[in-house]
Image: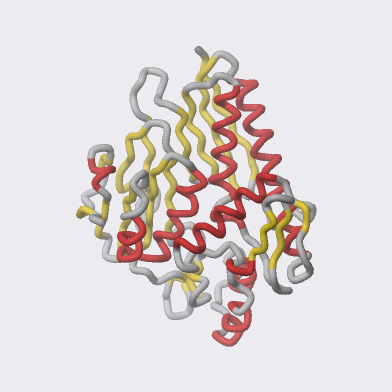
Amino acid sequence: MRSVEATLAVMHTQLSCKVYGEQPEAAIKAAFAEVKRLELLLSRFLADSEVSGINGQAGNGLVDVSPDTIEVLQEAVAVGALSSGAFDVTIAPLMNLWDFTHAAIPPTQAAIKEVRSRVDYRQIRLDVKNRRAGLGEQGMMLDLGGLAKGYAADRAKQVLIEWGIESAYINLGGNVLLLGSKPDGSAWKVGIRHPRIQNSLVGAIAAKDVSVVTSGDYERFFNDSQGKRQHHILDPRTGCPARSGLIGTTVVCPRSLHADALSTTFFLLGLKGCKKLLSDLPEVGVFAIDENLQGWITESLVSVFQPVTGLNISLLST
């Protein structure tokens, strides 16, 4: 058994893989090709992508799409309904308005109100049988950033399995997906970043064959003229950065697609909403940090969480 590590710039981030097996180079090459293929379908920043095709025809009927795009959009609608609209992949017009890449001044409330009228996941139109998709109103736009990386990580893992790989660590822009255990049978360790101390961890999750995904208010943000942190996780119900009381949420579950969507969803809903949803999600573990730097952890993760800093942690009971 040999090991190979490689990285790829894709989906506006970096994909890194460490793979153990008999043909690790070929396996990684195939996995990378699959993620690149999915970027060409799911990125709204590529003019020829299927998502751009849907956006360009918003309000003008359905367009032909691939099974991959249909599956991701089905998940988007499901999580939108599960979260009562807190998770909404039609958020793109608001993301464009806030422009976290260049802006340092929040948009006006009038502008937010106008743009927010074009955000509603219930306007996603799907014809699953004929593989067609669209948006109900002109000016609407999809941004699958809260799902696409997770879906792509899952597909990369499946490709590695098809190549006979039984042990791998996949990290797609912070979406960590573990294939099996380490070659010696021990658990992988996935660090959880401290949301307020740069280059510091609050702890690590020891895990096998699951996905670990974190959402936080420290990834993309600017401080406005009053010193208030304006971060990139927008709440479609207000049109503004989420103020749920949480500043970081980590989700552990089998599929990275689900972990990706739920880490954002729990961040948006806060502790109360998180507890409500978790009662129906037995396979999902959560570690969250609130604005007072109090940690919260589900019982399923207590035995595998390894603290690094002296954070006070309480049980997140459902």
Q: Is residue 102 visible?
A: no
Task: Count numbered badges in the picture.
Answer: 0
108 over 158 or under it: above or below: below
Relative horizontal placement of residue 64, taking residue 7 as reference (left or right): right
182 over 153 or under it: above or below: above
**Residue that appears at 49% across and 45% down:** 174
Q: Position of residue 308 (x, y in %)?
A: 26, 43
88 over 110 or under it: above or below: above
**Residue that appears at 71% across and 40% down:** 37
Q: Position of residue 177 (x, y in %)?
A: 47, 37
> Residue most toward the front?
129
Relative horizontal placement of residue 37, taking residue 146 as reference (left or right): right
Q: Quadrant of residue 318?
A: bottom left
Q: Position of residue 255 (x, y in %)?
A: 47, 41
Q: Is residue 35 visible?
A: yes
Q: Position of residue 124 (x, y in %)?
A: 64, 64
Q: Quadrant of residue 25?
A: top right
Relative horizontal placement of residue 137, taking residue 18 as reference (left or right): right
**Residue that appears at 38% across and 38% down:** 190
